[in-house]
Image: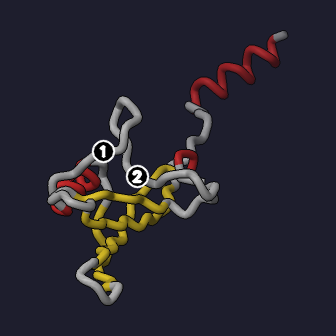
Amino acid sequence: MKKLIVVLAIFSATGIHAQTDTSTVEQYCEVVASQRLLSNKVTIDIDYGEARSLFQSNKVKDDSGKAKKFNTVIDALNYLGKDGWKLVNAFPISSGTDNTVYHYVFRKLFASKDALE
């Protein structure tokens, strides 16, 4: 019994603590901004790289589950910036008509345990 008390006293005196995982992982997403038909607003799709079904949408949704409507691309970029995403690259892709789709690549650091899968 004395040995157990001595061992416990030594462990408590040395301040042994459980290790915590503080590693981070860099995650990327692609934002695709396209003009809405007959509107000056834009539709934002976000690709996090996960598998999804053919009918699943990548549109940003508000708290009620409806597709969020952004006034401009800058409105959408500010929305992502407030969520901690950092812009890496931006490029337009034109389809030959007047319809140009803008692509934005973002990155964000996550704790390893919170990384997107």
Q: Position of residue 107 (x, y in %)?
A: 38, 65
User: Mark 2 — residue?
Assistant: 59
Give the residue at x 53% y 46%: 114
**Left or right of 30: which side holds 35?**
left
Give the answer, above or below, for where 35 lies relative to 56. Answer: below
Q: Which amino acid does the dot numbered 1 rest on?
A: Lys
Snapshot quadrant of residue 99:
bottom left
Give the residue at x 46% y 53%: 110
Numbered mark located on residue 5 in the image: none
The Cα–Cα distance between marks 1 and 2, rounded to whole angstroms, is: 7 Å
Q: Residue furthest bottom?
A: 96
Q: Quadrant of the C terminus?
A: bottom right
Q: Secondary structure at mark 2?
A: loop
In this view, the residue in front, 86 or 95, is: 95
User: Mark 1 — residue?
Assistant: 68
Give the answer, above or below, for where 15 lies relative to 28. Answer: above
Snapshot quadrant of residue 97:
bottom left
- Mark 1 near mark 2, Cβ–Cβ under 8 Å? yes
**Left or right of 107: which side holds 111?**
right
Task: Please say whether residue 77 is visible from this viewpoint.
Answer: no
Q: Quadrant of the N terminus?
A: top right
Q: Earlier in the sequence, mark 1 or mark 2?
A: 2
Q: Residues within 10 Å of mark 2 (few under 14, many from 20)?
A: some
Give the answer, above or below, for where 1 lies relative to 84. Answer: above
Q: Position of residue 115 (x, y in %)?
A: 53, 52
